[in-house]
Image: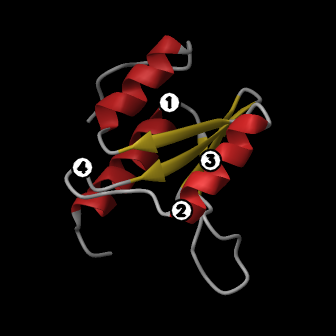
Amino acid sequence: MKRTPENVVKAHVKQYLEMQGWYVMYHMACMGSMSGMPDKTAIKDGKTIYIECKDPNRGRQSENQKEFQKHIEEHGGTYLLIDDIEKLMDWCEQNGLAEQRRIL
């Protein structure tokens, strides 16, 4: 995988969540996949989160990603837009889902 800023964020997200005990799934965009699907879905203790990772400098959601986020949130789901691992760490701490803070 090419080491772009977005891919670095994706790797940090996966590493952090797995070390916190989450089951993390990566979604590949391909023919037949749902348009706007986020990069990752993670599950822990019955809680599911949808995570879209972005380049911290240039990343923007597509209209399809915004629409997917809207549907998830309208149905009571959690959708996180992450461009910095600190945002994910903070969210996990605020929601009582962090077992340890600093690992990266």
Q: What is the C-alpha distance between the residues marked 3 and 1?
A: 24 Å
Q: Are marks 2 and 4 in contact (CB under 8 Å)?
A: no
Secondary structure under tag 4 reads loop
Closer to the eye: label 4 or 3 = 3
- Which of marks 4 and 2 precedes in the sequence? 4
Residue reaching furthest to the front? 63
Q: Which mark is residue 41?
A: none
The residue pinned by badge 3 equals: 69
Image quarter hosting the N terminus: bottom left
- Residue type at tag 2: Glu
Give the residue at mark 2: 63
Q: Amino acid at mark 3?
A: Gln
Query: In the rendered structure, which amino acid carries the disc numbered 1?
Result: Gln
Give the residue displayed 34% in from the left and 46% down from the top. 12
Tell me: 29 left or right of 74.
Answer: left
Viewer-nearest of discs 1 and 2: 2
- Between the residue at mark 1 and the residue at mark 4, the CA separation in whole angstroms equals 23 Å
Chain-order first, disc 3 or disc 2: 2
Identity of the residue drawn at 44% across and 57% down:
61
Q: Look at mark 1 in the image and give the residue it sits on.
A: 20
Indicate which label's residue lies in the foreground, 3 or 1: 3
Task: Determine the residue located farthest toward the bottom in the rendered image.
Answer: 31
- Real-space Cα distance between discs 1 and 2? 31 Å
Secondary structure at numbered mark 1: loop
- In three-dimensional space, the C-alpha distance between marks 3 and 2, rounded to whole angstroms, equals 10 Å
Vertical side of 17 occupied by 6: above or below: below
Q: Is the C-beta separation of discs 3 and 2 under 8 Å? A: no
Q: Nearer the viewer, mark 3 or mark 2?
A: 2
* Position of residue 80 in the picture relative to residue 41 (left or right): left
For mark 2, give the secondary structure.
helix
